Amino acid sequence: MAHNHNFNRSRGPCVLSLLAVWLLASPVTAQSFDAGSDGSDGALVVDTNTVLQVPDDGIFNFTTVQVDVGVVLGFTANALNTPVYILATGDVTIAGTVHVNAGHGTAALAGLGGPGGFRGGIPNPVAGAGGPGLGPGGAAGRNTATCYFGNTGSYATTGTLYSGGTASTPYGGSLLIPLVGGSGAGGIQGYGGGGGGGAILIASNTLVNVTGSVQAQGGRTSNNNNGGANCAGGSGGAVRLVGTRVTGNGTVHADGSGYAPSYRGGGGRVRIDRMVQSEGIPTVSAGHWVSSSLMLVFPDNLSQLDVTHVAGTDIAVGHNSPVTVFLSNGESPTQDVTVQAQGFAGSSDVDISVVLAPTLGAVTTFPGTIPIGNDGTGQLTLSVDFPVNVVTHVQVWTSN
């Protein structure tokens, strides 16, 4: 049986539940917060435009962070495309720009998601719909060669559409636990959809001061027709700032992209958590944002879903990157997909959707319910029908 399972996005971004247990953190004493950094990466000083490789687990352990005025700090995604976690024992000062912005679709390629976000749909080189954008709010491809007709990705809000487009579904919640990036726009004839904005968390024991900009912007389809319009936009991503103090007169952006100003990807999510509430905070532009005091970075008992078996192949629990399957002519399109749930204590069952997104073609969704035992775990196997002769992404989502 021919199949390729080099990606399996089954932890983190696949788990969209917002369980009350996440709020049951140990009490934080007055004016004391530990971001979790061990300081092993030392002090980061960014005085020229810099692109950092994201570590395998996504976590940077700094002592202090300084991004100077006029310079840009970006990131190269790791193999698992995790969110970016910048943790510091001391002050984080952002006077320039820190971003996990998505890539733009072109005539040859889909726009990549920012680190922790999802890519757009691939272009169709001939007449017919392009590929669907990935992610829980990924947009369907559309049979059009006019780029601002392309379907836009959604996140906190639904992407806006032009002339009878197909809306995708908003997702996620205000806690931003787990941290989830934005979703891609659909591809069209001749152009790929924009990617979804990435996901970044910046946490400091002491101070996060933003006088510059932190960004998780969606990508777009960029072309030279339609009057130079930039369209078919992915959704904005996610930004979370956590510290004893979070302040500054800068900006935080998690916006969708697209054909300005009307037909754009949905807005992303921003959360600012701080112990000192009396100071001013950066100006936020996003689909939804909140300022509060949830003083934890990584909860102890984060619920997760894992795809553990697809089309005859077992996959290790915790293999945290997207699954792809290819079935050739002569192979049965009906194959089993097994999903394991853990960390769902207090739930009697978990409603899931197994979503098959081919590189070209329509997305299909197969709903199911995982029964949860007293230990918070459970498993479900669904028989689903795959398309043949096309690489298909297997995605699993829950709204529990």
Image: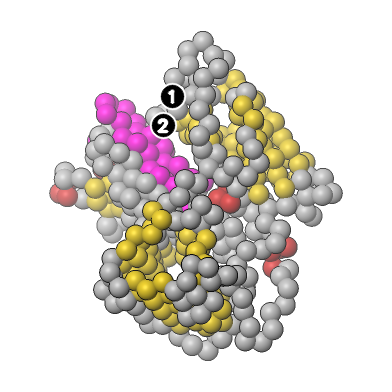
Q: Residues within 10 Å of mark 1 (few under 14, many from 20)?
A: some
Q: Residue 105 falls in which quadrant of the image?
A: top left
Image side of residue 225 versus residue 234, left or right: left
Which residue is labeled 1 in the image?
Answer: 390
Image side of residue 82 versus residue 396, left or right: left
In this view, the residue in front, 370 or 149, is 370
The tally of labels here is 2
Q: Residue 174 lies in magenta, yes or no?
A: no
Task: Find the magenta span and give its range.
Answer: 116-145
**Is residue 139 visible in this depiction of the protein?**
no
Residue 259 placement (x, y as % from top left): 27, 53
Q: Is residue 106 above or below residue 363?
A: below
Residue at image point 56% right, 86% down? 276
Residue situated furthest top in the rendering: 330
In this view, the residue in front, 356 or 262, is 356
Which residue is labeled 2 in the image?
Answer: 359
Q: Residue 274 falls in which quadrant of the image?
A: bottom right
Residue at image point 24% right, 47% down? 222
Q: Amino acid at mark 2?
A: Thr
Q: Residue 137 lies in magenta, yes or no?
A: yes
Q: Residues within 10 Å of mark 2 (few under 14, many from 20)?
A: many
Residue at image point 60% right, 24% down? 311
Image side of residue 20 versus residue 134, left or right: right
Q: Is residue 261 above or below residue 244?
A: above
The local secondary structure at tag 1 comes to: loop
